[in-house]
Structures are given as C-alpha cells and as structure tokens.
Image: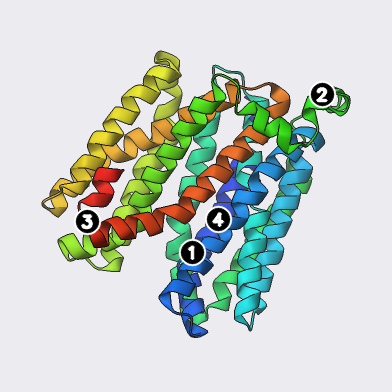
Amino acid sequence: MKKSSLIPLFSIVFVDMLGFGFIIPIIPFIALNYGLNPFMIGILLSTYPFGQAIGAAVIGRLSDRFGRKPLLLLSITGTFLSLLLLGFSRTVVLIFVSRLLDGLTGGNISVAQSYITDLTDEQNRAKGLGLIGAAFGLGFIFGPAIGGYLSQFGYQVPAFFSAGLAFINIFLVIFMLPESLTKEHMAELKNNPKAKFSLKVLLETLKEPIVGPLLHSRVYYALAFAIFQTIFALYVQKKLNLDAKSAGFILAYVGVLVVFVQGVIIGPITKKYSEKRLMIVSSAVLAIGFLGWALSPSLVFLLIVLIPISFSSGVLNTVLRSALTKSVAKEKIGGILGLSTSLESITSIIAPLLGGFLMGNVGLYAPGIFS
C-alpha cells in the first residue's frame, strides 16, 4: 500500500464526511423555517440518497474508464456547488435542487474505495478499505456536533463552512493525489469494450456467480443497519425516555467503536481468518445484537448490546466491500462499488419509512426483530 497516496486520500474522505456531517442536523430545521410539514421534510431528507442511487453507479463506472482522480474531482466539485446553493437558497425549490445535486454527484466515497483497491493487493485490501471506513466514520462522528454548534450563528453558516471544506478538498485532489490507474492501464481500457460505460455491461456483472450473492448481502446488511440508525433516537425516547442529546451521544459511542474496528482491528483479523468466515460470524453476531437491541430492558443492557453490534457491523461492512472488489475484473471495480453504493442509498430511502411503520404499528421491539 502506498502511504504517500493513502494519507491525502484519508484526509479527503475525512474532510468530505466532516462537511457532510455538518449538514445532517440542520436540514430539518432549514425546512421547518420554510413551513414544510414532517412528510415533506421526510421527502427532502430522501432527496440526497435518491440522487446518490442514480449517480454513484455512473460515477463509479466512469472512474474505471477515465481514472479515479478526475471523477473524484467532479464529485467533490458537485458537492461544493450544492453547498453554496444551499447556503444562498431563499426558496424551498432551491433547497431541494441543492440536495439532489449533492446526491447525483455523491459518488466520491465509492471512487475513494476504488482508489484504495488500485493501491492494494488482495491480502491488504480489507485493511485499506477499513482505513477509509475509519476516515468516513470519524468525519461522521465530529461533523454533526460541529454543525449543530455552528447553526446557532445561522443555518447558512454550516452550509458555507462545509462548502469551504469541499473547496479545500478540491485543492487536495488536484495537488496532492496522484492518479491511481497507470497510463498503460487507461490506454488498455479504451480498447476494451467491457470497460465502456454501459448499463447492460453493469447489469451483466450481477449475473456473475459471486457478485450477486455479495450484493444481496450488502443490501440486507445496509437495510438492517439503516433502520437501526434512523429509528434509534425515537426508540430510546419511547423505550428509555432519553432526549435527543443522549441519543446522539449513544450513536457517537457506536461510531467510535465502528471506527476502532475499521481502523485498528480489521487488518489483523483479515490476515488470520478468511473473509467468508468473517462474513458468516459477523452476520450471526449482528443478528444476535439486533435481537438484544429489540428486547433491551435498560440503558446499561443497551450499551452492552451495542458493543457486538458495532464490532460485527464494522467487520461485515468492510469485508463485504473487499470481497466485492475481488469478485470482478479490474475494469469493473469502480462500477461495482458504485452500484453497491447506489443500492445502499435506496435502503436509506426505505429504512426510515419501514422502521417507523414497524415501530408505530407492531411495537417498539419490531425494528430490532426485523433487522
């Protein structure tokens, strides 16, 4: 693994997720200022993952053909412009447009994962992806807290601050990040019909013997964990009578554990155990953990249960991505990671609706049982 490239890439992902995290807690409040009802706020929150479901697969696939650096630059530039638009927005329509633009160009994480894949061999793949996952998690832990603090100076401040971070990222990509695909590889791809951007080629990839089951597993995992994330605050409020601040701290606790797994533990355990074995064991532990979450009688019990949930989630998320990159030819890696991100984005749209329905119509325990 080339550390000279890994350090700026880690910084780019961290800064990107830090900026994204700034925006998460303020979007509902911006919407409320314009008089949107809860249903319309839900639609607004779904706009970003809807755009990402379309854009991530396209950007990932294009990065296979034209290189990681230019598509990473395109994606971050889209984020920068969308945040400026959000900051200057004076109408509801522009707010929706800004979130959709950010989603459509939001393939930077899948391109970053493809970049790591280019720099690592199969033995070190999971460790490299784990480090990117750790950067992702750290940005998401600190981002909402800082964004919430900045919002006291006006809801436009976090948007402009995030735009500034995205602008810094543009310069990091231009001046510090070399292209991970060689000129020879790029020239070879231009003459390879399988490397051309085509929905048909991408869908044909799903029929390959290993890819389909791995993507199914990613969807099941992503849906289960997205339900946990989106419904958790409401769950602890109704079940344990905790406020939003306490729920935020507990989710930050989960985030810290996941980052620790992806940044420290994943490298050694993937060298000791096969990825298939890790998938099976972590899936089983995650299932037991979600069951414990569903039936938690107290806060202490819940905090204990969240440890296996966090650890198994960190492992499963990383090894599934690593296995995906090994299941396709090199010219399809960006496309398959982008498609995986697109599918995960769809689960982000479904999860709050499904989790809310289960909790409201079946019981507080139902989202955990389903997950």
Gap in Å between the C-alphas at discs 1 and 4? 12 Å
**Nearer the camera: disc 1 or disc 4:** 4
Q: Which mark is residue 24?
A: 1
Q: Residue at the spot x=55%, y=29% of the render?
A: 128
Q: Quadrant of residue 176?
A: top right
> Is tag 4's residue or tag 2's residue first in the polypeptide sequence?
4
> Is tag 3's residue or tag 2's residue first in the polypeptide sequence?
2
Label 2: element kind: helix
- Please provide percent x and percent y for residue 180: 74, 31
Whether label 3 touches label 4, CB < 8 Å: no
Q: Report the side of 179 relative to 6 (left or right).
A: right
Residue marked by disc 4: 49
Gap in Å between the C-alphas at discs 2 and 1? 39 Å
Gap in Å between the C-alphas at discs 3 and 4? 27 Å
**Nearer the camera: disc 3 or disc 2:** 3
Label 3: element kind: loop
Label 4: element kind: helix
